[in-house]
Amino acid sequence: MAPVGAPATWVLSNHDVTRHATRFANPPGLGTQIRTAGDRELGLRRARAATLLMLALPGSAYVYQGEELGLPDVVDLSDDVRQDPAYFRGAGQDGFRDGCRVPIPWTREGSSYGFGAGGSWLPQPASWAELSVEAQTGVPGSTLELYRTALGLRRSQPDLGAGESVEWLRAPEGVLAFRRGEFVCVANTSGESVTTPSYGRVLLTSGEIAEADGETKVPSDTTVWWTTA
């Protein structure tokens, strides 16, 4: 975007593609409207790591409703409840976008998990009760609290948010490591644990890490934020 003087914009999910918690739970190459649940635990771990990587990049970031709860796509909607217009046109479109458009759960109970008194226009899975805002609020390590903390740090850290470049750091294969002023981000996509330097005080991690003797063990599918200040 630099040649046109515009900031970069980043997004992981939207209303037209399978939620990234489900995309990352499946093998690559399945397209944008995936209809298999995949490995839910793996998908969520990767989604959380991708979120911290995205929010560490210079520019603007967009959060699609429900990703802050770690919601997966609903891949088992029956044909009789579908609402996607493309599903009914039958002109070659996939038409399975309803899975990412199911209303988010606010509470553990209720006909629409607190979304509204009129119910939900697409059915919400029973398992979403424990993914609701009510269930995750104030729970250390929950995906909702991870987002809240990350967004708070993004606002408060002077080297996060707007910007035009990053300083790439040496890292093992499959690991993205960069510095922005006094801020450092390391994202391990290698599929196995790696050891990196400890770059200062840990601000936030998408998963558990171990620090000892000036080094940090970063598990696979994990992103770490540091400040050197």
Image (cartoon, helix red, strand yellow):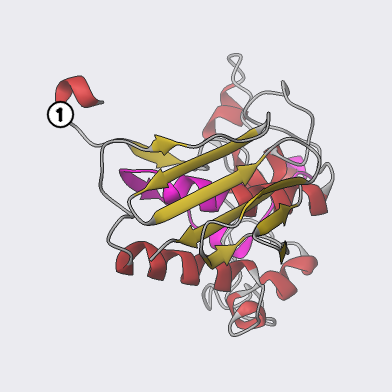
Q: Residue at x 62, y 80 (%)?
A: 107
Q: Residue at x 39, y 70 (%)?
A: 152
> Which residue occupies the extreme top position in the image?
92
Per the rendered image, the range of residues in magenta is 50-79
Is 202 on the left-hand or right-hand side of 75? left
Instruction: Identify the image quadrant of the N terminus.
Output: top left
* Label 1 packing within 10 angstroms: few (<14), some (14-19), many (20+): few
Q: Is residue 56 magenta?
A: yes
Q: Which residue is mark 1?
A: 5
> Which residue occupies the extreme front position in the image?
213
Q: Is residue 83 magenta?
A: no
Q: Nearer the viewer, residue 127 or 197?
A: 197
Image x and y of residue 211, in percent: 70, 64
Is 161 on the left-hand or right-hand side of 172? left
Q: Amino acid at mark 1?
A: Gly
Residue 159 sits above or below residue 98 on the image = below
Instruction: Identify the image quadrant of the C terminus.
Output: bottom left
Q: Nearer the viewer, residue 198 or 104?
A: 198
Residue 24 location, quadrant? top right
> Which residue occupies the extreme right position in the image?
39
Residue 216 location, quadrant? bottom right
| Residue 81 appears in the rendering | no
| Residue 135 appears in the rendering | yes
